Amino acid sequence: MNGRELEAILTQRGRPRVLIVGDLILDRYVSGDVARISPEAPIPVLTARRSEEKLGGAGNVAANLVAMGAVVDIAGVLGDDGWGRALRKLLEDLGIETTGCAVDASRPTVQKTRMMSGSQQMLRVDWEDARPVSGAARDQLVASLPARVKTARAVVLSDYGKGVLVPEVIAAVLKAAKSANVPVLVDPKGEDYARYRGATLVTPNRKEAEQAVGRKLAKLEDLPSGADELIQKSGLDAAVITLGADGIYWRDKRGASGHVPAQARAVFDVTGAGDTVVAQLAFYMADGVGLGPAVELANQAAAITVARLGTHAVSRAELAAHLAESHPHGGKVVRGGEVEALLAQWRRARPCLVFTNGCFDVLHVGHVDYLRFAKQKGDVLIVGVNDDASVKRLKGAGRPVNPLDDRMEMLAALEMVDAVTSFAEDTPAKIVERVTPNVLVKGQDWAEKGVVGREWVESHGGVVHLAPMVPGKSTTSILDRAQGGAELPSC
């Protein structure tokens, strides 16, 4: 599917309820600088500057779903310790329901501490007890699951091999899901996928799939038979195999399949990419999207995740902006809520944002020079275009010569323009406030008339620049020549 089709699917999604069951992990990052070797041993000395705690394991799956707008319930096991309380708070701060989390004082909350020098991971220290959960914690978990499954529209089993997904827990989920006709997606661990029998699909990476089938799946031609074997062994509806740099392969029990190539962008850190994929699939399947489009969207989200350091929860707005970049020129044309999504993405990156506006009815060299001037004042340029009704009110009968969609596409084709949107009002006051640019650009002919939006921009720390006009180059003169000298209102 092309970017526009995927965008349409994304924008139509609701807020499905998803249950996550699995291993809860607290990811801790200790970051600093290495400037010397220890005199005690031939090892680098990390001068720590800061530390950060994030959700890992099943918690990262939950965070990804929240970012996409899902309502999330989570069930797992925490230790009776400070790490467990910190992990629960991270979940609750995101609005995730945690009453399904049991506390087991006999085991620590799983914590992974990564020592970072710049963007490089030097060492990872794991605190864990991976024994199968048992006793009161297991019984509490099993007892709470049927009711939670029935209120969900999809369930994810997030298996990190830390002991939570024991046979009793898996059986409780699958029995309740079958009764309620709720799909169950499994991010698996180990070689025995038979214990997931009755689930909807599994999402192993290539290495995990090879371990499960007992042979190499080195080539794309090897994947159909491997996926079929996974499906047959575990009584699944489908298998989704993530392939790293080769993208994602999926196949269902009816033989339908697809291979989605990886997105061409730099890989910075693959941590949490599998969590992103299973979370994305659960989100779309919970809201009625078919497996093929769901995999394509999950692949796009994974491309964002691997370009970030550590785990990263991809938001719906971030994914929408990423999809908009995937189709030429038209990807620069943003409408409705797409504007907020794009602005949110830019504000996170903190570029100098430039805004200008106009009718741009008949594009000419004066416009090109004007827009080039605007782009030189910052990093990204968004252009607001009067819609057809407002142009007619401003310019009179017979205008615009070119309809709005044509005018926007022409502007989008210019290399100095980063985004184009439209507005319906006679003045750009509202859209200037909506964008709140760092720089507002208008032509010098507005010096005496007063630049609409100046007060708003300057009150928010921005500046206004007046662009010089190219003598003799205007829409008026072009249309005048085309119509044999008839007087026309200026553009």
Image (cartoon, rainbow, N blue to C red):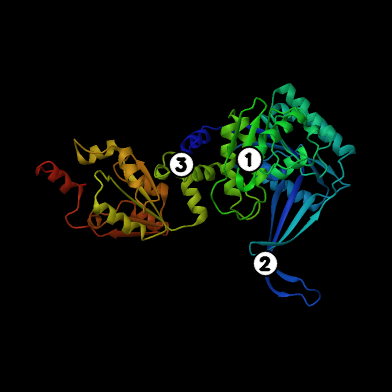
The answer to whether marks 3 and 2 mark residues whose Cβ atoms lie closer than 8 Å is no
Mark 3 vs mark 2, CA separation in Å: 37 Å
- In the rendered structure, which amino acid carries the disc numbered 1? Leu
> Left of 449 or right of it: where is 484?
left
Which numbered circle lies on residue 338?
3
Q: Position of residue 260 (x, y in %)?
A: 57, 39
Q: Secondary structure at mark 3?
A: helix
Q: Position of residue 291 (x, y in %)?
A: 61, 31
Q: Secondary structure at mark 1?
A: helix
Q: Which numbered disc, 1 or 2, marks the residue that appears first in the sequence?
A: 2
The answer to whether 177 is drawn above or below residue 431 in the figure is above
> Left of 135 or right of it: where is 6?
left
Which numbered circle lies on residue 220?
1
**Is residue 404 visible in the rendered structure shown here?**
yes
Residue with the mark numbered 2: 32
Task: Categorize mark 3 by other alpha carbons within 10 Å: few (<14), some (14-19), many (20+).
Answer: some
Quarter of the view holding residue 49:
bottom right
